[in-house]
Image (cartoon, rainbow, N blue to C red):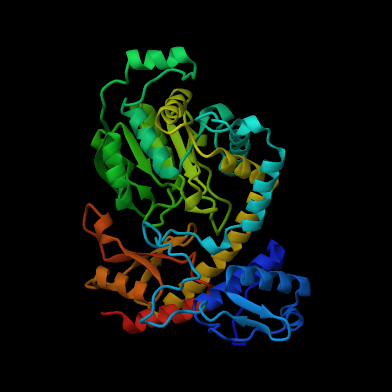
Amino acid sequence: MADLHVIIDRAAGGLAGQLARELREAVRQGRLPAGERLPASRELARDLGLSRGVVVEAYEQLAAEGFLISRVGAGTTVAPAAGRPPADSSRDPLVPACEPYYGRRSTSPDLGAFPRERWLASIRRALATLPADALDYGDPGGIPELRVELAAYLGRVRAADVTPDNLVIVGGVAQGVSLTVQALAGQLPVGRASHDLNWFVDRIAHPAPPPGRIRLAVEDPVSMRQLPLLHAAGADLVTVPVDGEGIDVGALAATGARAVLLTPAHQYPTGVVLSPCRRGRLIEWAADTGAMIIEDDYDAEFRFDRDPVGCLQGLVPGRAILVGSVSKSLAPGLRLGWVVAPPEIAESVRRARGELDLGSPVLEQYALADLIRSGGYDRHLRKMRRDYRARRDAFVRALAEHLPEITVHGVSAGLHLFAELPGGWDELSAAETAQACGLAAEPVGPMRNSPGPPALVMGFARLPVHRADDAVRAFANRLPR
C-alpha cells in the first residue's frame, strides 16, 4: 500500500471513524487507486499501533459504503468504481452528487471531522428517552433543554450575560441576523406570543405594522454574502472602515447609524481582533446614542494564542445582541444557531419564528443539548482547535517559504487568514490559481467599499498538514505575477 500519511489522534477517541475517514479520503483523492490491495487488518493495526478491532471496524464501514471490497481468502481491495475517476468520466456513481450550494468558502470547517459517532449517540439517547409529545411542535424559540444548555455554555465559554429566557434558537447566523435587523427596524410585532385561538384571531385583526427601515453600519471590508440579506431585512447600509485595531469607532459615530453589525472576535475578512480600546469606545458609543451592537460570533471558539475573547454582549447586555451558530464548530448543514438579546428583542425574534416557520427541527435540538450536556461538544472543540492550529501553522510556514512576498494577517483565531499581496498583483487571477491548486481562496476587492491593497482570504481548515507544502508550492509556481 502507498505511503498514506494516515493521521490518528488517539486522544480524541473514535479511532475507527478517524481511520475510515483517512482511508476514504485517500480513495477519493486517488492515493489509493481502484484495485489496490489493503494490508491485512492485523498488519495495519500493528503498523498504526491500533487494535485489530479498530481496523476491522473501519474496513467494514468502508465496505458498507462501497469504497472497499472484502472477500474471504482474497483480502480487502479498493472497489473498481471508488477511486478518482478519469478526466473524461462522469462523477463516481458510489458518491452522491452533492456540491455545496455556496461552493467551498474560505471559512468552511473540515466537514470530514464532524463527530458522527458522538452525534449518533446523542440522537440515539434522544430517541430512547424522549416522550412522544416531545416530538410535537415545540416552542418556536427553541426547546427549553437546549436553551438551558446553551445559556450555560455561552456564559462559561463566551462570558455572555444570558439566561434561557433571552436566548432564541434560530436556523443559523443568517436567519438570526435577519430577524434581529427586522426587530430593530420595527418590522416584527412586539408583545409575548401565544398559541391559543384568541392570539391567532388577534393577529388577523391586527396585522403586523408596515415594514420599517434602520440605518445599519457594517464593516469595510465586509462579507458580500450578507448584504442582500441585510437589505431585505430592512437595513439601509453605511460602511465603516476597519484598521489594525478593528472598526473605526470615530467614523462609526459620524454615520448616524442606529445599529452596527460587526465581527469583533475575528473580523471577516481581515482577521483583526477588536482591540480593548476600541471595545471600550464602541460600548460608549452605544450607550451615548442608544444604538445597538449586533455581534456576529461566527468562529470565536477557535482562538489559538489564548482563551477566546469574551463577547461584547456580556459587557453591555442591554445594548448588544449576540448571534452565533454551530456552523463552524460542527457543520453548516445542521442549521442551528442562537440569538442572545435584550428581552423585548428576544421575544420579537421568538414570535417571528412562530409566524415564519414554527421553529427549528426538534430532534436535532435535543441531540445538540445532549452533546453539550455530555461534554462531547467541548471535547470535539478541543480536538478541532489542535487540528486547526496544526493546519494553520503548516499553511503559514509554507506561505513564508514559497511566497515570502505575501504578508499574512489575522492568524490568531478562526479558520482563515488574510493574505496581503504585493501591489500590482491581480487578486482574481491569484484566487483562481489558488483554487486550481486545491486551496480555498477568495479575492478581497469585491468586499471593499474603499480602495485597498490586493489581498486574498485563504482558508486552512480543510487543508491537511501533509498537503500544505505541496499545495502552496504549486500555487507559487503557477501564480501569475
Looking at the image, how many numbered discs can be counted on the residues?
0
Res. 223 visible in picture: yes
Q: Quadrant of residue 440?
A: bottom left
- Point 39% across, 75% down: residue: 90
| Vertical side of 200 occupied by 249: above or below | below
In the image, taking residue 70 as reference, residue 334 lies left or right, namely left
Horizontal side of 195 relative to 67 (left or right) equals left
Residue in view at x 36 percent, y 28 percent:
183
User: Quadrant of the image for the N terminus?
Assistant: bottom right
Q: Position of residue 465 (x, y in %)?
A: 54, 74
Of residues 126 and 395, the one drawn nearer to the viewer in this rendering: 126
Location of residue 435 in the rendering, given as x and y in whole percent from the top left corner: 36, 72
* 459 lies left or right of 421: right
Determine whether 115 is above or below 20 in the image.
Answer: above
Quadrant in which residue 154 is drawn? top right
- Note whether 456 is above or below 242 in the view shown: below
Position of the C terminus, as image quadrant, is: bottom left
Q: Where is residue 362 shown, x and y percent of the image?
A: 56, 38
Q: Position of residue 78 (x, y in %)?
A: 58, 81
Q: Residue at x 50, y 70 (%)?
A: 94
Closer-to-camera residue (327/163): 327
Is 147 in front, or is 41?
41
Residue 51 visible somewhere in the drawing: no
- What residue is rendered at 27% in x and 34% in y? 234
